[in-house]
Image: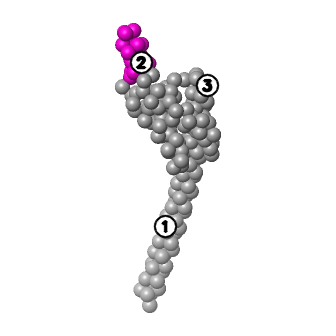
Amino acid sequence: MDYFVIAVLLASMLLVGLAGYALYLWQKLRARRTEIESASEQLESELQSKNLDARQSIQIIARALLQKDLSDTEAAMRIAFLSQQVAATDVEVQQFTVFQQLAEATAYIPILEDWAMLEKSEKRRLNAERKTIEAQYRDFIQAGAQQLINIKLS
């Protein structure tokens, strides 16, 4: 009988130890889930903020384009880049397409420091090419910019 009591006591102690360990693991799992949910909420908040910032920037660029403060090509390059940062609806994707097309059509034209290093004759030639390409897209770009100034900000 002594062996039976000792075995029951050992089994009980083992069971209590395992139950304690299970409780410890459950608490760690719960804490980890809370961390993951918090990180997920923070990421979602950051994504929404970036989406809003990109949408606002697109509106600003579209307004500048309509006011002739930017060339069609410059606006298209900027809007095409920003459109990749927006969680766009199907309608918005269609609006961005013309800007992406113009940006791709003029992508070979150097910018910034590369442009500054070109000779004047090369700059004139590339400007003429750019204006010819822009003329092909002008009506679509202007209509797209008009629609983009009303882009939903949320």
- Which mark lies nearer to you, 2 or 1? 2
Image quadrant where residue 145 sits: top right
Q: Nearer the viewer, residue 15 or 6?
A: 15
Give the labeled residue for mark 3: 67
For the stretch drawn in magenta, the main secondary structure is: helix
Please tell me which of labels 1 and 3 falls first in the chain: 1
**Callout in the foreground (3, 2):** 2
Q: Residue at x 60, y 35 (%)?
A: 146
C-alpha separation, residue under disc 3 versus residue under disc 2: 21 Å
- The reply to whether the C-beta atoms of the residues labelled 3 and 2 are less than 8 Å apart is no
Which of pointers 2 and 1 lies earlier in the amino acid sequence? 1
Mark 2–mark 1 Cα distance, whole angstroms, equals: 76 Å
Q: Position of residue 108 (x, y in %)?
A: 36, 25
Q: Is residue 77 magenta?
A: no
Q: Residue at x 52, y 65 (%)?
A: 26
- Picture layout, residue 105 above or below residue 86: above
What residue do we see at 45% from left, 22% from top? 131
Q: Which span is picked out in magenta?
A: 109-129
Label 2 sits on a secondary structure element that is: helix
Q: Which residue is mark 1?
A: 21
Of tags 1 and 3, the one toward the viewer is: 3
